Amino acid sequence: MKTATLARLQQIRLKNAMLISNGISNLIGIFVVHVIRSGLGYEISGDVFKVSYQMNVIFIPFSFAAAILITLAYEAPIRRFLNMQFEGGLPHQDLKKKATRRLLNEPFFLICLDMGIWLSAAVIVQFILISHKAGEHLMFQSFFLSFNTGLITTTVAFFVFEFVLQRRVFPFFFPAGPLGCAGE
């Protein structure tokens, strides 16, 4: 019973390693920019603050949900391959090839996804601030805070993804060594 439970936990951890890593990277990016922003000391009107808060309440959960769904769709072959491996089945060679290709490209895909989400946040905020007649200074700061969150998140994500892949995922996919090249 304990072995089956440990195997199931290992499977869950392996299947969700990149998804969790991406969430953590985004939270780190948000935290770092929040710390930076709190030191800027600029004042915003109550109306703009209210709009900004409402946008965050809507945009952040939506963007995280979208990122999760897009990631799950991208990882579908990887997850099918892992399910077959853990169930003792022999995955078809085409599935293994597709899963391996997706896995090797996943860090770049997720980094582009993250930056795209943060750039869209920067643009959406601009339209909302324009509609509420916010000043240029606030619009400039708002754009660069979202943009910087994207830059910080993608930088952190790159290193987190590489660590997770090297330590957790690649040993399972490539047990013979670096990318399956035993002794070469």
Image (cartoon, rainbow, N blue to C red):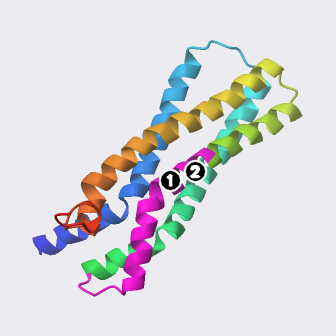
Q: Which residue is found at the position 63% from the left and 28% from the top? A: 145
Q: Residue furthest left?
A: 2
> Quadrant where the N terminus lies?
bottom left
Q: Quick check: is 21 in the magenta stretch?
A: no
The answer for how far apart the CA atoms under marks 1 and 2 are is: 6 Å
Which region shows up in magenta?
87-115
Q: Is residue 6 left or right of residue 87?
A: left
The mark tally for this picture is 2
**SS class of the residue under badge 1?**
helix
Observer-nearest residue: 91 or 11?
A: 91
1 and 2 marks in contact (CB < 8 Å): yes
Q: Is residue 80 left or right of residue 44?
A: left
Question: For the residue marked with disc 1, what is the amino acid?
Answer: Phe
Q: Which mark is residue 108?
A: 1
* Residue that numbered label 2 is attached to: 112
Position above or below: 89 against 35: below
Q: Which residue is found at the position 44% from the left and 75% from the top? A: 98
Q: Which mark is residue 132?
A: none
In percent of width and height, residue 81 lies at 36, 77
Magenta part, dominant SS: helix
Mark 1 crowd level (few <14, some 14–19, many ≥20, 10 Å Cα) = some
